[in-house]
Image (cartoon, rainbow, N blue to C red):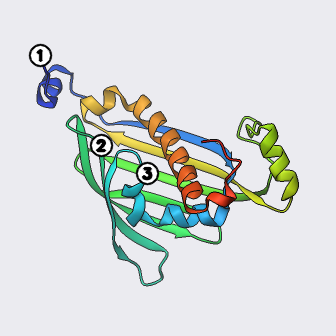
Amino acid sequence: RFLISTTMLRAILPSAVATTKRHAERKILRVDPNELFNIITDVDKYSQFLPLCTHSKILRRSDCGTTFDATLTVGLPPLLSEDYVSRVKVDEDAMTVNAKSIRSQKFDSLRSSWRLRKVPSGGGGTANGDDDRNSSEADAQSKSPNKMWCDVEFEVEMTVSDPIIVATLDKVLQGVAGNQMEAFRRRCAEISPQRHESSPQ
């Protein structure tokens, strides 16, 4: 069985200029918006539930508490494994979280942003107008009409020069965005299962 190492792949693939790709997801999630916001900003626990994240730790916080630096280890060993540091800015009133890499070997730049909005349960739909509710969820909503759901926008943008990453960048970003959204939804369900009994698994 013949195995190709990443060093061999880089020798075979043509050199790549810096390439930037962006992918965005928007969905209505049947989760408490404040709870989701707290989970997004609790970077220390990312490695407990995020796919492909094996280490996560907040390194330092600003005096005002709205900015912090965090280190994460992500990837698909042995093809790709990266330790990088991001600077994260949090706005609790606007319910936004923006992160930008400040130290990385494989990523020229990595940015991500979350924007959360509270919406009445059953209202708003997804970006394409469908909130994917089934009949049991509609019944649950009718029993708790004041419950809030969360309109979630997540965007990730990556700039890389590594030819291996460039070759798969579109699929990688699409997978990252979709998997991130689902992982955070599941985390909410794990923390407060009684609130998410009607959410699809």
Q: Outermost residue toward the bottom?
A: 63
Amino acid type indicated by mark 3: Arg
Find the distance from the CA under tag 3 to the CA under tag 2: 16 Å
Percent across and percent down for residue 130 are 76, 36
Query: Which residue appears at 35% of the width and 65% of the height?
Result: 70
- Nearer the viewer's eye, disc 1 or disc 3? 1
Find the distance from the CA under tag 1 to the CA under tag 3: 36 Å
Query: Which residue appears at 81% of the width and 51% of the height?
Result: 140
Closer to us: 191 or 112:
191
Task: Please say whether residue 103 is visible from this viewpoint.
Answer: no
| Quadrant into which the C terminus falls | top right
Percent across and percent down for residue 28 are 70, 47
Amino acid type indicated by mark 1: Phe
Q: Secondary structure at mark 1?
A: loop
Q: Which residue is mark 3?
A: 111
Q: Which residue is mark 1?
A: 2
Q: Which residue is mark 2?
A: 75
Amino acid type indicated by mark 2: Gly
Work out whether mark 2 precedes mark 1 in sequence or the reverse, and give the earlier one: 1
